[in-house]
Image (cartoon, rainbow, N blue to C red):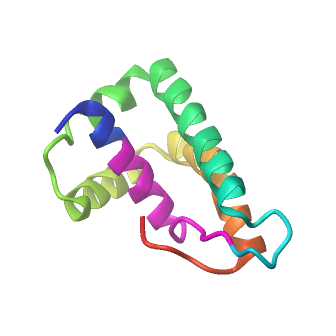
Amino acid sequence: MPITTTLSTALLVGAALLGAAPVALADQPNCTTADLEGVRAGVEASTSVYLFTHPDLNAYVSTLEGLSREQVAEHMRDYLAQHPQQQAEMTGIRQPLVDLKNRCGAVIAP
């Protein structure tokens, strides 16, 4: 499994820890598929920058390659519980996905 897939899995797990990724609803303002993908792309780009500037977390996430989603989730919960500053910063990075979920209301599977 390539590192980008592991990172994507970690991102999805992170989103799941906060309530999963939102679904776009056509009848809500700014709840289209394009809105979802734009927010998701921004969160992924911000996460990439964050990981490049935090090599310890980047190295740790890279070791999770090949694990199941459940295992990645467990390892990430444990790691972030021991690193509250990084947990707070990663929560901030993912906040736009949470906001979109709260605004649009529904959830889709990753």
Q: Is residue 62 above or below residue 52?
A: below
Q: Position of residue 20 (x, y in %)?
A: 50, 68
Q: Is residue 87 above or below residue 52?
A: below
Question: Is residue 23 rendered to the left or right of residue 9?
Answer: right
Q: Is residue 28 magenta?
A: no
Q: What is the quadrant of residue 42 in the picture? A: top right
Q: Is residue 12 above or below residue 90?
A: below
Point 34% across, 51% down: residue: 76
Q: Please give the count of numbered marks on the rendered protein.
A: 0
Q: What is the quadrant of residue 89 in the picture? A: top right
Point 15% across, 51% down: residue: 67
In this view, the residue in front, 35 or 7, is 35
In this view, the residue in front, 94 or 37, is 37
Question: Is residue 48 rendered to the left or right of residue 68?
Answer: right
Q: Is residue 89 visible?
A: no
Q: Position of residue 99 (x, y in %)?
A: 73, 63
For the C terminus, give its image quadrant.
bottom left
For the N terminus, give its image quadrant.
top left
Q: Is residue 23 magenta?
A: yes
In this view, the residue in front, 108 or 26, is 26
Q: Which residues are magenta?
A: 8-24
Q: Position of residue 14 (x, y in %)?
A: 45, 55
Question: Is residue 5 rendered to the left or right of residue 68?
Answer: right
Q: Is residue 106 above or below residue 74?
A: below
Point 61% across, 51% down: residue: 37
Point 67% across, 49% down: residue: 39
Q: Is residue 77 visible?
A: yes
Query: Given the current orientation, which residue lies at the most extreme right position?
Result: 29
